[in-house]
Amino acid sequence: MKKRIVVALGHKALGTTLPEQKIAVKKSSEVLADIVEEGFQVAICHSNAPQVGMIHTAMNEFGKKHPHYTEAPMSVCSAMSQGYIGYDLQNSIHSALLKRGIYKTVSTILTQVTVDPYDEAFDHPVKVIGRYMNAEEADLEERKGNYCIEEPGKGFRRIVAAPKPKTIVEIAAIQALLDADQIVIAAGGGGIPVLAQGADLKGASAIIEKDYASGLLAQEVNADVLLILTKDEHLWLNYESENAVALHQVTVEEMKQHIANNEFPKASKLPKVQAAVDFIEAKKGAGRKAVITDLAHAMDALAGKTGTIITES
């Protein structure tokens, strides 16, 4: 049987502007095609931080200039970012595969992810979104129930919560595509955060960490490997210091100790490490592994030659 992998693409693999994204996804698609050629069933999750911020700013500015249009909520901005990143990715991957004589459908699933309305993250928003505002505009946002933070000398920006993902709504469709040996792009940007209200799903004013969503996706599709692509070849302890130590082969217990010692930055590396640990521990004894590396070393890391490789023991 083929092994199943979930690949989490960081924003370095996607670029920031539309022209940058076109170039970046071509490079990313070649690596993804390499993984398909190795015989993996592939699901792809991706970042959307620059893109969703651009959409949020553009839609809200449009709403201000045209009173008959409303401003776009975060859930809508997230959905739009999933659509246009997925569009570029699926076309680029499709092209890379065809050039190798591989005929597979690449599909983007507009993915909703439920969050807990009582998640403590809603009381402590941390994710900065959108353009800089003056004090008057920030006050207006806060009257609407939104949170803003001041950056000295620059102005105010809106901040939103980053709750943990609970369930992936479209998981059956994602599973069906993987079972059919097709390539699927899902939970882009961490998924569209939604709150379950009876039979309805209501968009939440939040952003889900892409790494946590990719780890949950890997758990729910019973993946063998979680590959998290970031900007460094390895994870490091004492990063960018004279005492920096690269992590290579590491067990879950060792990583849990590093987490307990606060050795990973909370806003960047910690979600990757925690997602990897949660993925492996969700099914002990299954031989799962998580690999954290950069795009350029993805294939060598999967082969165990480099990167940070986390295993159960």
Image: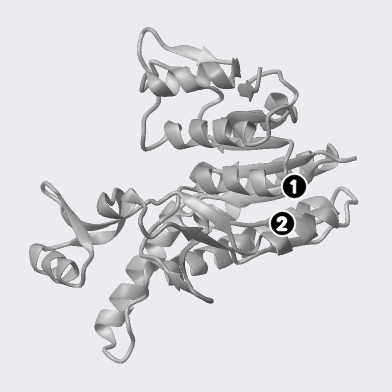
**For the residue marked with disc 1, what is the amino acid?**
Val
Vertical relation: 181 (above or below) 105: above
Instruction: Name the image quarter holding the C terminus.
Output: top right
Circle 2 — which element? strand
> Residue 133 occupies which quadrant of the picture?
bottom left
Answer with left or right where residue 286 lies relative to residue 23: right
Q: Alpha carbon of mark 1 to alpha carbon of mark 2: how far? A: 7 Å
Q: Residue at the location (63% across, 49% down)?
A: 217
Q: Residue at the location (90% across, 40% down)?
A: 1
Residue 113 locus on image (x, y percent): 53, 60
**For the residue marked with disc 2, what is the amino acid?**
Val
> Residue 310 occupies which quadrant of the picture?
top right
According to the picture, the residue beneath numbered tag 2 turns out to be 184
According to the picture, the residue beneath numbered tag 1 turns out to be 42
Answer with left or right where residue 203 lies relative to residue 310: left
Which of marks 2 and 1 precedes in the sequence?
A: 1
Is residue 26 something one can see in this rendering? Answer: no
Q: Are marks 1 and 2 in contact (CB under 8 Å)?
A: yes
Q: In the displayed image of the protein, which residue is found farthest to the top?
A: 243
